[in-house]
Structures are given as C-alpha cells and as structure tokens.
Amino acid sequence: MGQILAIDYGKARCGIAVTDDMKIIASGLPTVETKFLLEFLKKYLNENKVEEMVVGLPVDLRGNLSDVETDILKFIEIFRKEFPDIEVHRLDERFTSKMASFFISQSGKSKKKRQEKGLIDKVSATIILQNFLEQRTR
C-alpha cells in the first residue's frame, strides 16, 4: 500500500499533506516554496511510496478559475512526465484557506502563529486531502 499526497499550490508556497499507508489519516508536511516543490517531491517520492496525488483546483465563488491555475497545469504536466505511475486528481479547494484559518484559531495558537501563511497552506493541504478521502468513501 502507498500514500496519497495533496498539494495546496500557490504562487509563493505550497502546502503539502499525505495520508498514512492505509489511506485513512491526512497529515501535513512542511510547507515548501513553490520554486522548490518539484525538488522536494522527487526526494519525498524516492523515500516514500505514493500512489496518487491530489492538487487543489482554485475556483472562486462563481466557479471561475484563479490565475494560479495556469501555473498548476504546467506543474502537473511536468509532474506526470517525471512520475507517470502516480495518478493525479483535482479537487475544488474553495474555502480551504478560510477553514484552515478557523481551525488554527480554534487550536489556541498565538495570533502571530495563526497569521503564519505557511501554517495556513499546510492545514489547507490537509483539508484538501481529508475532503478527497471522504469523497472516496461515499
């Protein structure tokens, strides 16, 4: 068995989360600067068995795609060439940043820690992955 990896892709940083090998629990990994994402994934995938990847689909309330979608599509194209055996899924990521901010605020973290963008990205990736897992069990 292998893991499922999720990415909350951003222009500056990417939040990353993975499941356990039984694909039950989603946990956040360190946030990575976008320019180092592929390098990070190569190392991670070399050390861990990942079977699938989920990348957030950035849409607004009206269903319009965000500007970052062009960058995401380029990234996915490169990723598929590097790792053709890993299936790539997309999942609507609407509200994940707001949900992440809410969960972080409820966790008792200091205001400074709550405003840390990297933490929000990490939690957002975890929410994307958890939502993906929940959709699979329906």
Image (cartoon, helix red, strand yellow):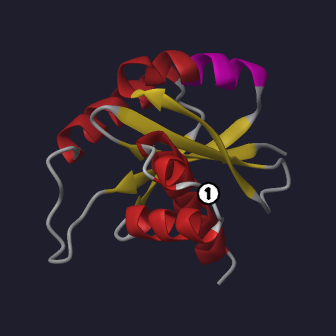
Quadrant of the image containing the C terminus: bottom right
* Residue that carries the numbered disc 1 in the rendered image: 109
> Left or right: 131 with respect to 38?
right
- Mainly helix, strand or loop, the magenta region? helix
Tell which of 133 and 66 is nearer to you.
Answer: 66
> Left or right: 111 with respect to 46?
left
Find residue 107 and report its image quarter.
bottom right
Residue type at mark 1?
Lys
Tell which of 110 and 47 is nearer to you.
Answer: 110
Against 53, residue 40 (above or below) is above
Could one spot residue 42 in this view of the protein? yes
Q: Give the range drawn in magenta.
A: 41-47
Could one spot residue 88 in this view of the protein? no
- Residue visible at 45% across and 44% down? 116
Tell which of 79 and 130 is nearer to you.
Answer: 130
Q: List x then y, in percent, for residue 89.
A: 47, 53
Q: List x then y, in percent, for residue 109.
A: 61, 57
- Residue visible at 33% across and 40% down? 10
Quadrant of the image containing the N terminus: top right
> Left or right: 10 with respect to 82?
left
Against 127, residue 82 (above or below) is above
Against 13, residue 53 (above or below) is below
> Left or right: 69 with respect to 111?
left
Q: List x then y, in percent, for residue 39.
A: 51, 15
Judge whether residue 45 is colored magenta: yes
Q: List x then y, in percent, for residue 84.
A: 52, 30
- Residue visible at 65% across and 64% down? 108
